[in-house]
Image (cartoon, helix red, strand yellow):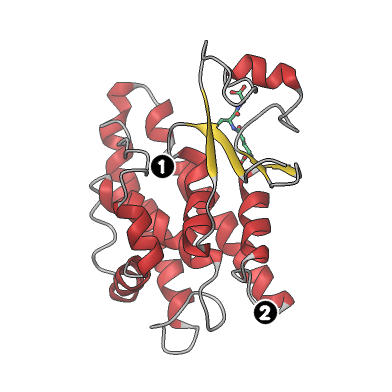
Amino acid sequence: MTKPTLIYFAARGRAELIRLVLAESGMKWEEHPVGKGTLPTNGRPTDFDALKASGLLPFGAVPVWEDHDGFRLAQSMAIVRYLGATHGMLGKTARDVAQIDQMLGAYDDVRGELRKLVLVESDQRAALRVELDTQFLPRWLGHFDRLLASNGDGRGYLVSDSLTVADLALWLLCELIRDNGFAALSPFALLMAHFERIGRRPRLAAYVQSTGRFPFVPLPK
Ligand SMILES: N[C@@H](CCC(=O)N[C@@H](CS)C(=O)NCC(=O)O)C(=O)O
């Protein structure tokens, strides 16, 4: 028997949405932080290469989730869906699940596009940032705003009538956009209200304010 464990770097990255789902569920988990040249913890490697060689990572990549009975799962979105389903945050119908998947796919698309700031040559960053803030983000935030508006009066949840992992994915994207200094979010009143409403949920707010949360690392300017 092991404690439920998240294997990832000591960073937000691809694991942060998983952590939001865990925080909102009220479940306690352990971090198994991956490093380079680091020593084993709890009898298991933390050095990334040693961890890969150990066979503990189904696809040789992180994040990996491990349940108390040793059940292990790779792929961040599969983990989000699994934990969401376990804790009643994956909707009620097949259509809810499909709409949640739609949002998780969009979350990956938008996050991947923002991460291009890390990959481009430094002299192209300023132009990319302007393009993201004036074209790419307004387009996507408009999509999200319309999706919210089409569910009831738009003042509840993204899908169905209770919190799902789709709301947490949207919240995390909005936080990423805000904290990286993009202005694109402010014209979207429903989205802003959703961001504030979800962020006020006691468990999420407690996690976000906790010292246990790994620090924000801004995208390069
Ligand atoms: N689609 C996978 C991608 C996982 C992935 O590529 N993770 C990176 C770290 S963020 C990794 O472990 N790469 C393998 C390596 O660096 O050798 C997911 O969402 O979990």
How many residues crowd mark 2 within 10 Å: few (<14), some (14–19), many (20+)? some
Residue 187, by quadrant, is: bottom left
| Placement of 191 over or under 207, stated as above or below | below
Identify the residue shown where x is 65% and y is 50%.
79
Disc 2 Cβ-to-ligand 1 distance below 8 Å: no
| Placement of 149 over or under 213, stated as above or below | below
| Placement of 152 over or under 191, stated as above or below | below
Q: How far is disc 1 from disc 2 in space, using C-alphas? A: 32 Å
Spot occupied by residue 220 in the image (x, y as percentages of width and height): 30, 31
Q: How many marks?
A: 2
Spot occupied by residue 121 in the image (x, y as percentages of width and height): 36, 21
Identify the residue shown where x is 38% and y is 83%.
155
Disc 1 Cβ-to-ligand 1 distance below 8 Å: no
Q: Which residue is mark 2?
A: 92
Q: Secondary structure at mark 2?
A: loop
Q: Which residue is mark 1?
A: 114
Q: Residue lying farthest top?
A: 37
Q: Is residue 134 visible?
A: no
Q: Quadrant of ligand 1?
A: top right
